[in-house]
Image (cartoon, rainbow, N blue to C red):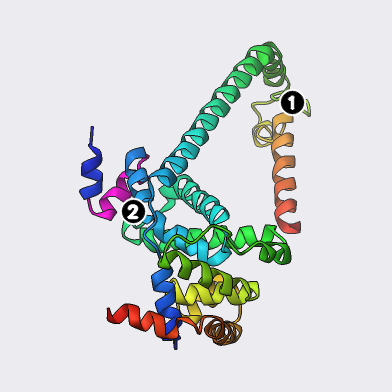
Amino acid sequence: MLTQDYYSRSPENIVVRLARNGDRKAFSELVSRRQAWIRNLMRRSCGETSLADDLSQQVFLQAWKTMPQLQDPGKFGPWLKRLAINVWLQHRRRNDPVSAAAGLRDEAVATDDLARIAMDLDAALATLAHDARLCVVFAYHEGMTHGEIAELTDIPVGTVKSHIRRGSLRLREQLAAYAGRTGEKQDT
Amino acid sequence: MDRDPLLQKLFDIANQDLPGDAFVAAVMSRIDALRRRAILAWAATGVVLAIAAWLLTPTVVGAVDLLSQALPQSLVAIDEPSALMGQVMSPLNSIAAIVSVTVLVIAFAYRKIF
């Protein structure tokens, strides 16, 4: 019987191999390692904490179910990202975009500066059209290229570029107050 | 790709290190529920199949018995089965042969049409 300490010290590809063979503790370790990344991606994408967490749980459930199909354990990250994006796109297709946009602002009280920035960013993102928001989040949060975003979302590359350019300008206007502050934060 | 440095910085800052214990527990509990449901579904399927087999066994045995008697029946009575004509015709001269040819023709037509 392997201890939890063994899983937490093991490289990810070993843990992925174990999880792929149905090792529940190994999968739990993977969830623990990747949860913040997936939840942040979902939070930026939908702006609602509880919905984002629910969608993130769905991502990991899908991952558990389809884990045996993962050929290369070294590509677990990109594979999980693709699952997450598919879960988000499916959710978006099932839901009316207009009503979904209406409840985007998370009403949770910001407890510190970081949470405040996340809330303001999510609020600014909520003002973008859905496709534009998707493109901007994938570009800034995931560092994806125009081509990668176009391939994943089935949006033409030209439209992706335009969404990111206009979306960035709009976000920039709304978050202009942070222009000096983030600089100060970095200098200190 | 040109990314706005301010926005990139805000996205990076907003990327919080979220505490994961409750989240991991919730995911694993949903996975356990999924496994329980799968085990129940397999068990229910097994029970249904066992009951169906128990109920249908006499009917299936009867049908197989009937088929095994009917399929080798000759379609055309040949006076001398050992003669050349009888030997040439024997692979096709049965209900089983006609059924097989019909199935093959239907499968071929299905592939051609669809």
Report if residue B95 is visible in the image. yes
Q: Which residue is mark 2?
A: A33
Q: Chain of mark 1?
A: B
- What kind of element bears circle 1? loop
Question: How many circles with numbers are drawn on the protein?
Answer: 2
- Residue at position x 47%, y 39% in the image: B31
Q: Is residue A23 visible?
A: no
Which residue sits at x=46%, y=70%?
A: A117
Out of A2 and B70, give the one closest to the viewer: A2
| Residue A28 belongs to magenta span | no
Give above or below for B15 relative to A162. Answer: above
Magenta residues, start to end: A10-23
Against B53, residue A74 (above or below) is below
Image coordinates of residue A132 in percent, x first then y, are 60, 77
The quarter in which the N terminus of chain A is drawn is top left
Residue B74: assigned label? 1
Q: Quadrant of residue A2?
A: top left
- Residue at the image point whose x is 36% and y is 45% from the top: A27
